[in-house]
Image: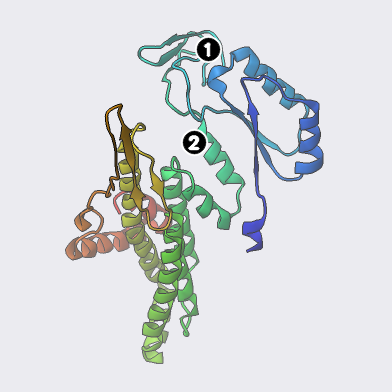
Amino acid sequence: DEEFNEIHVIWYVVNAAWARFENFEAQLIREVVAPIPVIFVLNKADVASSEQLEAIEKTIKNHNFETCRGILRIVADRKQNSQNWCSKCGSDDVICKRVTQELFCDNCGNKEKLEKTQGLTALVEKTAILLPDLAKEAFLFAQRISLNERDQRAKQLVTHYAQSLNLDVRGKSLSNVAHMVGRLFVLWGWSVLGDQVSTTLFHDIQADFQNQDLSVRLAMIAADTLMKRKLSRSVVACLGLLVNRPLRRLSSQLLSFIDSLSPSSPSINTNNHNHNISTSKSSTSTTSTSTSTTTVVPPQFSASSFFLSPSSTDAFVDRFMVSVFEIGISQSIDRFWDES
């Protein structure tokens, strides 16, 4: 709890259009913010000139802040279809076509499409590096642009728990299996359900394990030890892959649905835990006034698109287990991750 309440990193936002970073701000960074890591966010970079941006960056660098972890040019909501600097090399030797919203850099040869946002992915990735493990899941879910980042984090979690499992006679280590599944749910935004699944799963699998005769449990542990724990760890890894599959696909489908709604459409209210989506609209004319409320229901997802059939699951597990014994846990997870 204390770890969640701490401030782990600060985004210090500078309005790039003003082209100023004052001395009192430097004092604030040193005397108030320190020792917390700081990422300087040069917002509205699309309306600032190359000279303005370079001047701000130089000023910040000259202060030699020990806590500085980066200076990023960010466009959170592009207001114009032009830009006079290259996002790759920073040069102002560029040609911008407003009609096609394309930018060409004569200095480095870069060609890019001017998107609505710019630099946000880099900001999320740099921030995630600075956060402790337990805070990463919550942060990454809050960023709609971090789908791939969350998926990579999920892979790290599965690999970690799979490689650290050590069976014991009482089955206490099985709590790590339940913890892994719960954290996957939290990572993909289902925090309440994640806690419930983790608790229920631990009680169920521990009870099943302890209901086995002691001789059976000892035989299982002995066999697993002789196999260098590849048997138990491959089962945990495979479970992680199969749990992550529907969670990843559901998040991708929901974000695609939200993105498909026109920006001019009615406002969208989302809740991270149950993903309810609703809209309302009203229209007015000189002769009459009418108000209507429309509920937008997310598309019905077919279960078959999220889960493998029983026969496919068995085949997947068999292939994964064989792979683990051939090339190991980590490499097998990498090989089967996108297929899972």
Q: Nearer the viewer, residue 135 or 260?
A: 260
Tell me which residue sits at (44%, 43%) in the image.
Answer: 144
What is the x, y in percent for residue 335? 34, 50
Question: Looking at the image, which residue is at 59% across and 14% down?
Answer: 50
The residue labelled by disc 2 is: 121
Q: Amino acid at mark 1?
A: Asn
Q: Quadrant of residue 38?
A: top right
Disc 1, SS: loop
Between 98 and 290, the one lying in front of the other is 290
Categorize mark 2 by other alpha carbons within 10 Å: few (<14), some (14-19), many (20+): some
Q: Is residue 13 above or below residue 202?
A: above
Which mark is drawn over residue 84?
1
Q: Above or below — where is 19 with respect to 316?
A: above
- The residue positioned 31% from the left and 34% from the top of the image is 283
Residue 208 horizontal/vertical position (percent): 36, 83
Q: Which quarter of the image is occupied by the C terminus?
A: bottom left
Task: Assign a secondary structure to mark 2.
Answer: helix
Instruction: Identify the image quadrant of residue 274.
Output: bottom left
